[in-house]
Image: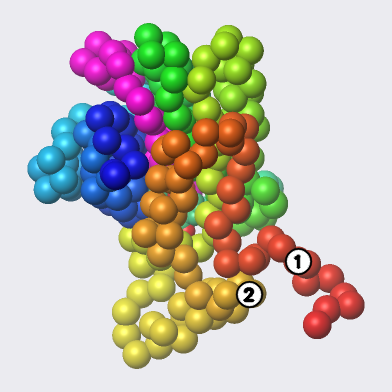
């Protein structure tokens, strides 16, 4: 039995990377998937491929969310996945001493405002049925400090906390709307490809980037999609306000001595 039969699901940032894998997996499990993204070309292509619908959506734009709410007033699952590191627009620096206020705001606008607006839309669009699942894409960076990507880490930490506020609010309201966060570490997506690059040293560079990860490899987008599916489905009906770490064991221990 498909796990999302007769469900509708919005995946923001669904045009590529982790979002595209979630959109594909949800469609395989019977969901009607709405791919929301600023990348119209890739988003439309994927939506056509999986029998879903593309909706142009800049998650930082309140107007775009209002348009979405008018077009799609009811929904069962919302995955607030769209996110940026800040490195897309500028090589930095993105540390706490030198980052510009404009870059700080831009990263928070997409990652945090986008998640706030996505949760607000979701609660309204799930109210009629009184049930649904919201999944917010945080990060390992939402659980630890990242000196070279301070805005990203701050925004992801705030997503973690907002997830819990949404979960408690919905429960207080007597709504069976669950809200949980996923915290991936290094997942091989286009976001990483630019850093890894091609050439004969590619595999060595990849290995160096995950040298501290106990499982010694990147995670895959399919592994994130599997967790999103669990949280979206009736396999996780008692999970709300929870966070799932998906990091190859990275946060299980500490590099502090004594090691071994
Ligand atoms: N890849 C990783 O290692 C990793 C680790 C932890 C968390 N994450 C998080 O997972 C999510 C997806 O990451 P990814 O690696 O697939 O990234 P990606 O860059 O490959 O894809 C991001 C997608 O979001 C879309 N997007 C960007 N800004 C948008 C906006 N304002 N409105 C709507 N769509 C927008 C892009 O067009 C793209 O389709 C992000 O929130 C990211 O922070 C990724």
Residue 67 within the magenta-colored segment of the rendering? yes
- Quarter of the image holding residue 69? top left
Q: Which mark is residue 214?
A: 2
Tell whether 19 sits left or right of 134.
Answer: left
Q: Pointer 1: what residue? A: 253
Q: Judge whether 41 appears above or below 87 on screen.
A: above
Q: Which mark is residue 137?
A: none
Residue 157 pos. (x, y %): 63, 40
Q: Quadrant of the C terminus?
A: bottom right
Residue 40 pos. (x, y %): 17, 39
Q: Residue furthest right?
A: 258
Q: Quadrant of the N terminus?
A: top left
Q: Nearer the viewer, residue 81 or 103?
A: 81
Pointer 1 and pointer 2: residues touching (CB < 8 Å)? yes
Q: Residues within 10 Å of mark 2 (few under 14, many from 20)?
A: some
The mark total stands at 2
Magenta span of residues: 65-85
Q: Residue at x 65, y 65 (%)?
A: 250
Assign a secondary structure to mark 2. Answer: loop
């Amino acid at each position: 039995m498909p796990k999302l039969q007769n469900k509708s699901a919005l995946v923001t940032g669904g045009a590529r990377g982790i979002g595209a894998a979630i959109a594909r997996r949800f469609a395989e499990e019977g969901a009607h998937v709405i791919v929301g993204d600023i990348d119209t070309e890739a988003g439309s292509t994927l939506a056509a491929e999986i029998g879903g619908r593309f909706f142009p959506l800049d998650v930082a734009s309140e107007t775009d969310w209002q348009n979405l709410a008018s077009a799609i007033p009811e929904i069962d699952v919302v995955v607030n996945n769209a996110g940026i590191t800040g490195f897309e627009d500028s090589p930095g620096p993105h540390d706490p001493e030198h980052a510009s206020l404009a870059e700080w705001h831009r990263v928070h606008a997409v990652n945090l405002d986008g998640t706030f607006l996505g949760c607000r839309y979701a609660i309204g669009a799930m109210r009629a049925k009184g049930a649904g699942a919201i999944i917010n894409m945080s990060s390992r960076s939402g659980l630890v400090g990242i000196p070279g990507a301070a805005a990203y880490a701050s925004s992801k930490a705030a997503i973690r906390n907002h997830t819990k506020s949404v979960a408690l609010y919905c429960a207080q309201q007597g709504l069976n709307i669950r809200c949980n966060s996923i915290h991936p570490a290094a997942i091989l997506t286009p976001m990483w490809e630019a850093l890894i690059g091609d050439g004969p040293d590619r595999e060595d560079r990849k290995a160096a980037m995950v040298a501290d990860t106990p499982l010694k490899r990147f995670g895959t987008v399919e592994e994130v999609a599997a967790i999103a599916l669990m949280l979206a489905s009736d396999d996780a009906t008692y999970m709300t306000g929870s966070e799932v770490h998906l990091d190859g064991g990275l946060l299980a221990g500490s590099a502090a001595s004594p090691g071994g």
